[in-house]
Amino acid sequence: MADTAKPDFTRGVALQALPEGRMVAGTAADEDIVVLRRGETVFAFGAYCTHYHGSLAEGLVDGDSVRCPLHHACFSIRTGEALRAPALDAIPCWRVERQGNTVFVREKLGAKDGKAPPVPAAAATAARHGRTAPAPGSPPQSVVIVGGGAAGLAAADMLRREGYDGAVTMISADSSPPCDRPNLSKDFLAGTAPDEWIPLRSADYYPQQRIELLLDSRVTSLDLERRRLRTDNGPERPFGALLLATGADPVRLEIPGAADSQVFYLRSFADSRAIIAQATGAKRVVVIGASFIGLEVAASMRERGLEVHVVGPETVPMLHTLGAEAGKFIQQLHESHGVQFHLGTTVQQVSGTRVTLSDATSISADFLIVGVGVRPSIGLATEAGLATDRGVAVSEFLQTSAPGIYAAGDIARWPDARTGERIRVEHWVVAQRQGQVAARNMLGAGEKFTAVPYFWCHYYDAEIRYLGHAASWDEVRIEGSLAARDCAITYLRSGQRLAIATLGRDLENLRTEVELEAGRLQ
């Protein structure tokens, strides 16, 4: 329902009343919209991001696109097209008419009305990114995607959006279709997001888009020369192009005395539901690992009313990711909500409901959740003879050492455009954007992956947004106040800006994204 306090642009507004280059929130036919003036041209588009309903009026306009302040989805202001993940669906656009010096927002445009005339996929992508399209070539006869996570779905979705008409198959070892994995440790685990929010696409999406989705199916071997693969439960399959998006597996611990039924890991939709079932009726839980995921799990368990103990070998949570001051702030935030920390320790033994730590502390717990990191699932790539380097080695185009074979997501190690180093990043948004770029490159786009890594974490009523990649740094600059939840933390090495973490400064985070993508590192 539209906000009646906002201007109704269907009644008209003077062109000069619209500030140049600034978004203005309003309504059109009882729908919330955003109006943007560029010189003599005015654009009208949907007010909310199609990912998590972020307010685009509070975002950032960059060229012909608008970026969402929540999770950095990007849309065309001309067509509404979702240009970059995490949003996959377009925002609506409205026709704008000018009569003299008055501007009127008219009817909503349909999906076809809001888009430019169709052009070949490679040419369209090249035009968006300011490149000359490569010479047209034959698209692959078929595309097989190994993996049912964020990268795999984003690739399949982009293939269809770019007009690819060949066979597309997704082979997933999971029992559930691609899901909103970040939510599994956040709102869903806390009990504030229903089951129906978790699938990234509805069940009818896959047949409608002619995407064959094979669940509970694991690829056991690749024959790159013959362009065929085998699964554990089906016949040999041919492929024209292949995307490896096998993700990562949780690091599992040997915990003396602990029964399998007591220890839980969180990676899949089924894992999250299993933890919720275990938490129902439980009183106490030990979370092993003071990482982003571990602490999100701790916060979610506190939201459910459980007594939570966090155990980890580090002396400060996330010291090597966010630094000492931010780590201490996060610890204090959790402690203010009742979480008890046991840092500098490990779990030594479990006996029934008694958990003994390495410092001899004894804790009573109904179950344990382990979140101590993941390892990239590169066994299939290694056995196939692809080049690996603590991940699957890919070029700036996300192609592996074999032509026509791409990798994306947690397994991909690529040359970072900003530092010149090879990096591998376990961020959900990165996986989606890599899947999109890999899909376009299968169709001949010749697009380099240059997106700046981004992720967010959610603890109670605080959200930290982290942009960039800083495996190490020699300087940390903090502007503002962590305690007031209004700050920006910049991580530098040799004077070069590598990453930024923000609290309460979403627009600054977006502006930094644009600057880093433009190569402004100082």
Image (cartoon, rainbow, N blue to C red):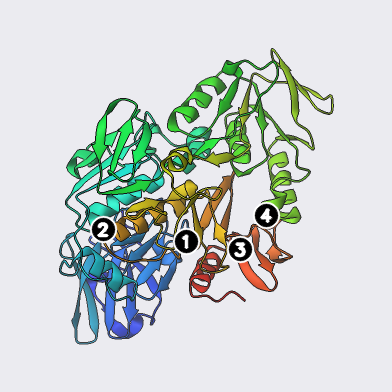
The answer to whether mark 2 and mark 1 are in CB contact below 8 A is no
Residue type at mark 2: give it.
Answer: Asp
Q: Compared to 480, does 519 lie above or below?
A: below
Q: Position of residue 320 (x, y in %)?
A: 70, 52
* Residue 500 disc label: 3
Dot 3: element: strand
Residue type at mark 3: give it.
Answer: Ile
- State the residue position of label 1: 69
Q: Compared to 257, does 41 lie above or below?
A: below
Image quarter of residue 474: bottom right
Q: CA distance from mark 2 to mark 4?
A: 44 Å
Q: CA distance from mark 1 to mark 3?
A: 15 Å
Earlier along the polypeptide chain: callout 3 or callout 2?
2
With 259 as the anchor, is 379 left or right in this view?
Answer: left
Residue type at mark 1: give it.
Answer: Pro
* Residue 322 disc label: 4
Residue 48 appears anywhere in the view: no
Residue 258 appears anywhere in the view: yes
Looking at the image, which residue is at 68% across and 58% down? Answer: 484
Looking at the image, which residue is at 38% across and 40% down? Answer: 147
